[in-house]
Amino acid sequence: MAHQFVVQLAHKPGALAALCRELERQGVDLKAIGGGGIGEVGHVILKTADDVKTRAVLESGAYTFIESESVLAEVDDQPGGMLSVLDRLAAAGVNVYGHLFMGRWGERATFAFVVDDPAKARAALGQEY
């Protein structure tokens, strides 16, 4: 199953560009990206076409990162849709490290989560794998 990476970055001009430049040099195609930063610390959440090469880039660059299987959740595209997923994860004791918006189809939206326990998250969301 495809993984997502949450990567800590210095919150300064060029930090994300440097990471993306090295991924490009290694031929890694970005499939989804999101992130942000406050103060001196930023982060990026990546979904790529090559988990092995992505991990190698992060390790060789001495990045602090979390890697986890993507846990997909489809929600109603309305106020509270995302909250219903987050409440179920919290009730199960699952910590969310990050999420990516994957798309919207009609009245539904899909998100991919990076969590501390993918199996527990899937169980909380009623998914059997």
Image (tube, rainbow, N blue to C red):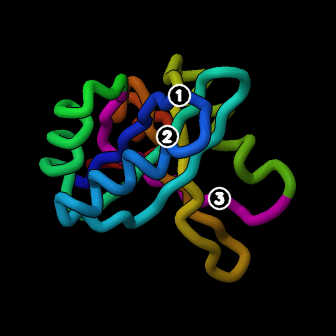
Q: Secondary structure at mark 1?
A: strand
- The amino acid pointed to by label 2 is Ala
Above or below, 57 against 11 in this view is below
Position of 111 with respect to 106 (left or right) is left
Between the C-alphas of marks 3 and 1, the distance is 33 Å
Picture disc at residue 10: 1
Q: CA distance from mark 2 to mark 3?
A: 33 Å
Q: Mark 2 = which residue?
A: 15
Name the residue tied to disc 3: 75
Q: At x 19% / y 66%, what residue is drawn? A: 27
Whether the residues at callouts 2 and 3 have beta carbons within 8 Å, the answer is no
Segment tinted magenta in the rendering: 65-78
Q: Residue 13 location, x and y as percent? A: 60, 42
- First reached walking from the N terminus: tag 3 or tag 1: 1
Please state which amino acid type lies under the numbered disc 3.
Val
| Chain-order first, disc 2 or disc 1 | 1
